[in-house]
Amino acid sequence: MAAPEIDIKYVAHLARLHLTPDEEKKLGEQLGGILGYIEKLKELDVTGVEPTAHAVPMVNVTRADEIRASLPHDDALRNAPAKANGLFMVPKIVE
Amino acid sequence: MLNQLTISDLATKLARREVSAREAMQSCLDQIARVDGKIHAFISHDAPDALVQAEAADKLLAQNIRDPSRPLLGVPIAVKDVLAVKGQPLNCGSKILGKFISPYDATTVEKLKAAGAIVFGRLNMDEFAMGSSTENSAFGITRNPWDTTRIPGGSSGGSAAAVAADECLAALGTDTGGSIRQPAALCGCVGLKPTYGRVSRYGLVAFASSLDQIGTFTKDVRDAATMLGVIAGHDPRDSTSVPQLVPDYSAGLTGNVTGLKLGLPKEYLIGGLDAEVKAAVDAAVKQFEKFGAEIVEISLPHTDYAIATYYIVATAEASANLARFDGIRYGARVEGHDPVELYSKTRGAGFGAEVKRRIILGTYVLSSGYYDAYYLRAQKVRTLIRNDFLKAFEKVDAIVTPTSPTAAFKIGEKSDDPLQMYLSDIFTISCNLAGICGISVPCGFTQNPKLPIGLQLLGKPFGEETLLKIAHAYEMNTTWHIQKPVI
């Protein structure tokens, strides 16, 4: 079965992943092959089959609603690439 | 040489005070100094810290109290670079985490420490556990101790190579589609992937959350039972860990497999199966018959769809999980004029080729217009694959297969052909989709060159006790696992 066309630029934008023109070309070729292989799932009739999201499903797992210690502020910031005034620093979002 | 011992042998010597934990640790450090230049199993290791831990263990050993809660007291154990160890670097074999230092211990690491282990070193891996050869690490490739022109398998290649090369007594790794069992097979050690939910994933950097499971690399099956007994169990910090009692796995190693039924899936006799691998597995099956096990032919009819299913489910989950690496809260950052540019540039510079490939594929199969055709369909096929196994386990106690269709391949042989690399996971991948447990044990060698071959046993959900019993019975009657590579 033919693999569908994949718009690498668009998908890379969705993934917030900058690719060089060379990477776009190479990935496009490789993904064409991989998607062609994946097409084989269409051979199967899955009518009425329930999807499996987890092999060992656990539902409504909650913990007791109690106050407990969390990661200390300084520890949470320690690995930040940029920080100021006890906060993560990011580029300007609102003009 | 103390570094060559199994956990059980070292623990006995330590308890008798014949040797010290410091000597055992030093012996591993000496071996690393001697061979790791050739193997490169470790990304880094903190020798002074390891020796401090060893001395602390020696103090406890000197008190001469037999403490059953510390079965690993003084045992040097190394960790894959995807698990958090407080105060140590955590890179996942990637550039994108920069100089990240873990602020806390993963639950498995916490448990190893509580059991007395000396937890040291960062073991190399395919970036974010994506790969089957450990060629995708930003920290360089790891080589197979049996033949340094060959790959050790992956993604936990560093863990497998370190145990096979006696650089540590045991190691932790992770298995999302075979990343423990396949490298264990190719390096000639014992690799155990527990049932999904058996071991807490807290402190494990997620690749594919519905498939990832932490497991062990050891020199024999008894050590695997000891290690699993330590790391298994429910953890409120991982909502997918299952509140089920942890049996005494070591006590289950009776050597008796009489009357147990082992299934041989007819779909696993594929074209690409190497003749020497097939012969070794056939011989192992004959031995099981001799020990009194019954061999039953079974069918797993959806085997042929497992790889396609896996590469949809795993990449979809990975594309979501890896969204967190955006240069804001941790890791390396490439500046941009606005947040979107910052994210894109950071991720473009920080991720390697295989990770980019899988993020793009995963984003694509989840994107509007394709979700039903790919992701939802794959989840339905996953149900069919899981049902195949549950049906088979109504008839048999475990399933026997090769771990990998071939022995270790050459470095570079498959690195330019991602699809060929993916296809090498054919025997290991279904286990993760079905959420069952699996183990790889050494079952022979190829002739020329001499490379290890692995036998895979797959067990029922939470059936590790039976799985270990069967693997142990085989090991008791064979010597493959005690053979050592010449490095």
Image (cartoon, rainbow, N blue to C red):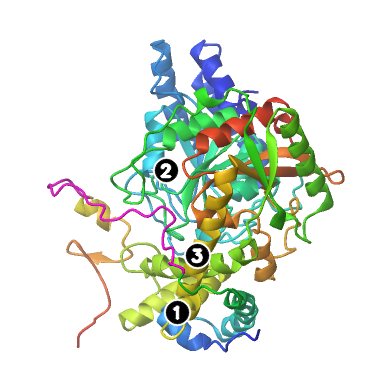
Q: Residues within 10 Å of mark 3 (few under 14, many from 20)?
A: many
Q: How far apart are labels 3 and 1 at the CA level?
A: 16 Å
Q: Kindly identify the residue that appears in the image at 74 percent across and 51 percent down.
A: B408
Q: Amino acid at mark 2?
A: Val
Coordinates of residue B118 in the picture (x, y in percent) = 46, 31
Q: Which residue is mark 1?
A: B372
Q: Nearer the viewer, residue B312 or B96?
A: B312
The nearer-to-camera label among 2 and 1 is 1
Q: Secondary structure at mark 1?
A: helix
Coordinates of residue B461 in the picture (x, y in percent) = 48, 45
Give the side of residue B274 with respect to residue B237, left or right: right
Q: Residues within 10 Å of mark 1 (few under 14, many from 20)?
A: some
Asked if one can make out residue B253 in the rendered structure from this viewpoint, the answer is yes
Q: Amino acid at mark 1?
A: Asp
Q: Earlier in the sequence, mark 2 or mark 1?
A: 2
Corner quadrant of residue B272: bottom right
What is the span of residues highlighted in magenta in the rendered image?
A49-70
Q: Earlier in the sequence, mark 3 or mark 1?
A: 3
Asked if one can make out residue B445 in the rendered structure from this viewpoint, the answer is no
